[in-house]
Image (cartoon, rainbow, N blue to C red):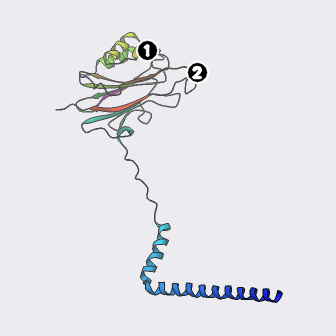
Amino acid sequence: MAGLSRCLGMRRGTFKAMFFVFASMCAWYSGYLLAELIPAVTLSSAVYSLRSIGERPILKAPDPKRQKCDHWTSCPPNSYAYRLLSGGGRDKYAKICFEDELLMGRKAGNVARGINIAIINYVTGKLTATQHFDMYEGDGSGPMTEFIQRATPKSLLFMATQDDGGSRLQAKAKDAIEALGSKEIRSLRFRSSWVFVGSIGFELPPGIQREKINHSDGSKNRYSGWPAEVQIEGCIPRELS
């Protein structure tokens, strides 16, 4: 019995070896036929395509086109782009941008503590005047009232506070700004952040951003002693000739 078992085991081993040799020959022959049937050019092209996948540059979306006054989207044709930013803290300066031109700002060298005002000719889109009025020391309220009243009809007036624009603001100045369409000027107080767009001799469209205010509050201020700056932007339709 032991001899019979050894004989059967040897036969099984021989059969497995023969099967392995046969399978190897079949695999080699299949590869040979495949190489004969497929042209060498096609194989080379396939290998090159696989290699080039890793070499192709990564496609990136183009950078968004910069719009006037750093708007996210462009204004419609026949309209003016504007952006107003109040000052914030000691180092954030007020900015007034119109049609991509910085009318007032730190780089322009013409902003200061108080209320900063730029006047634009609405018909031509040209700058008429800029001025800043200190509302913390001295008498800036009277001269500012006269400056506003000298603006000619068909004028745009842009206003932005820097530091403090409310401490010495007098009633006549508030009346003059309220006449331009302001709803918040009478609530302006010490170190309020405020921006406003007014008009003389024509009505601005009701849907545009015209005014924003943020009062100083010790429990909510972004900066030590100052509230966060405020900003408005938009598009004003040009006068149609």
Viewport quadrant of the C terminus? top left
Amino acid type shown at disc 2: Ser
Q: Earlier in the sequence, mark 2 or mark 1?
A: 1
Is residue 54 rendered magenta in the image?
A: no
Is residue 132 rendered magenta in the image?
A: yes
87 or 132, nearer to the observer: 87
Tag of residue 34: none
Amino acid type shown at disc 1: Ser
Q: Position of residue 134 (x, y in %)?
A: 44, 20
Residue bearing the label numbered 2: 219
183 or 135, nearer to the observer: 183
Q: Position of residue 177 (x, y in %)?
A: 35, 17
Segment colored magenta = 127-136
Which numbered mark, 2 or 1, is in the foreground of this view?
2
- Residue under the point 70% across and 89% down: 14
Q: Position of residue 201 (x, y in %)?
A: 23, 21
- Is 143 placed above or below 22 here? above
- Residue 179's image quarter? top left
